[in-house]
Image (tube, grey):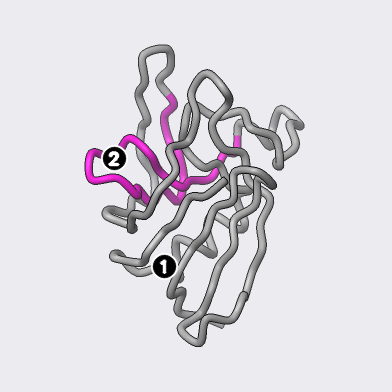
Amino acid sequence: MVELIAAIVVDLSDQKLYVYNPQQELVRTVLVSTGKATTPTPMGNGQVYTKHRSVTMRGRTYVVPNVPYTMCITENELICLHGAPWQEAAGQRFGVARSSGCIRIPSPHARWLFENTPIGTPVTIQA
């Protein structure tokens, strides 16, 4: 069932993402991996600016092709919510800060979010 998402909240302290519907009811809670201490995920309010079913991500120390279900929450596309199949393949659990600033989401949840989140959806990142 397709469910319209009205808001996403990422809590850095518990490494969880919370999804709310238009009635402000919590509809899903997902363990995520946010930025590590040296590359923290910035706190604040934003929105989903762009969506890419698959994209190559580049940073100073990495190039990762085929990053699935990517939704960027900064206009410059530096901070995004996305699947992390490499983390899953390595057996690294979610709920641990380990990214370069993005919010990594288990693939099934990333797909669901991607398919149900319209561009413009508010995203809050808090401690």
Among the 4 quarters of the image, the one containing residue 88 = top right
Quadrant occupied by the C terminus: top right
Residue 96: give x, y in percent of width and height: 70, 35
**Residue contact at pointers 1 and 2, CB within 8 angstroms:** no
Q: Which residues are magenta?
A: 64-85
Residue 118: give x, y in percent of width and height: 35, 69
Q: What secondary structure is marked by label 1? A: loop
Is 88 left or right of 119, judged from the image as shown?
Answer: right
What distance separates the C-alpha of mark 1 from that of mark 2?
A: 17 Å
At a point 47% along the width and 32% down the height, the residue shown is 101
Q: Amino acid at mark 2?
A: Glu
Residue matched to label 1: 117
Q: Earlier in the sequence, mark 1 or mark 2?
A: 2
Based on the picture, tell me whether residue 37 belongs to the magenta stretch. no
In the displayed image of the protein, which residue is found farthest to the bottom?
A: 23
Q: Is residue 15 above or below residue 116?
A: above
Q: Is residue 45 above or below residue 87?
A: below
Based on the picture, tell me whether residue 66 belongs to the magenta stretch. yes
At a point 59% along the width and 81% down the height, the residue shown is 25
Along the line of sight, the residue nearer the viewer: 39 or 68: 39
In the displayed image of the protein, which residue is found farthest to the front?
A: 127
Question: Tag on residue 39?
Answer: none
Residue matched to label 2: 77
Residue 97: give x, y in percent of width and height: 63, 32
Q: Is residue 24 above or below residue 59?
A: below
Q: Amino acid at mark 1?
A: Thr
Is 89 left or right of 44, judged from the image as shown?
Answer: right
